[in-house]
Amino acid sequence: MATSMGIRLLSEIDSLEEAKEMIVSAIGYLESSFNSNRNGWYAVPKEVNDFPHAPRWHYDEDNEMTIIDKSWGNPSAEILAYLYMYKENVKKLDVDKLIEYAINYIENKQVFNSAFELYCYIKLYKVLSERLQKEIRERNISIY
């Protein structure tokens, strides 16, 4: 989650060489931390419990995730927004396949328990091509 927030801020100054380098490095980290069983990312690693943190970031050993992770799109949809934006730097993941997964996921979701998940999807929607935005609208997926 911290990495996605870092890229969010760096994307505002990505014309600077230093920012580009940090974005490339962050993308490398995101590729290495991708969880193929989840087809996305978890909010934080279990080591978060070793440090002061917000209660919602507490890693539950029994469920092997935080309460945030019950909503796939937070942070995965926002991370996909950045991978889509900087696709030329993604070496190990199939961004297009993951975008299709994200669209199918939200299309089939019955209950939304997290406004933050929707915020992450809005970030993704805003960076997608007009064709993908149109596909989302045609599927009657309401994320606004």
Image: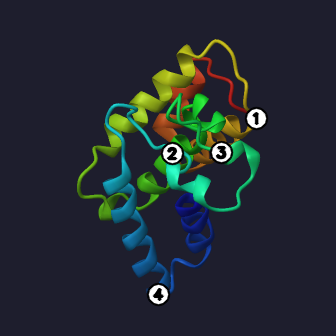
Task: Please state which of the two labelled residues, at mark 3 or mark 2, is closer to the viewer.
Answer: 3
User: SS of the residue at dot 3?
Assistant: loop
Earlier residue among tags 1 and 4: 4
Amino acid type for the residue under numbered disc 3 = His
Amino acid type for the residue under numbered disc 4 = Glu
User: SS of the residue at dot 4?
Assistant: helix
The residue where tag 2 is placed is 128
The vertical placement of 143 against 51, above or below, is above
Q: Position of residue 142 (x, y in %)?
A: 68, 24
* Residue at 48% in and 45% down: 129
Mark 3 vs mark 1, CA separation in Å:
19 Å
Mark 3 vs mark 2, CA separation in Å:
32 Å
Q: How is the image coloured?
A: rainbow
The residue where tag 1 is placed is 115
**Quadrant showing the N terminus:** bottom right
In the figure, is residue 20 to the left or right of 119?
A: left
Q: Residues within 10 Å of mark 1 (few under 14, many from 20)?
A: few
The residue where tag 3 is placed is 58
Residue 21: image quadrant is bottom left
User: Which numbered marker is on residue 125?
Assistant: none
Earlier residue among tags 1 and 2: 1
Earlier residue among tags 4 and 2: 4
In the figure, is residue 20 to the left or right of 115?
A: left
Amino acid type for the residue under numbered disc 2 = Leu
The residue where tag 4 is placed is 18
Mark 1 vs mark 4, CA separation in Å:
33 Å
User: SS of the residue at dot 1?
Assistant: helix
User: SS of the residue at dot 2?
Assistant: loop
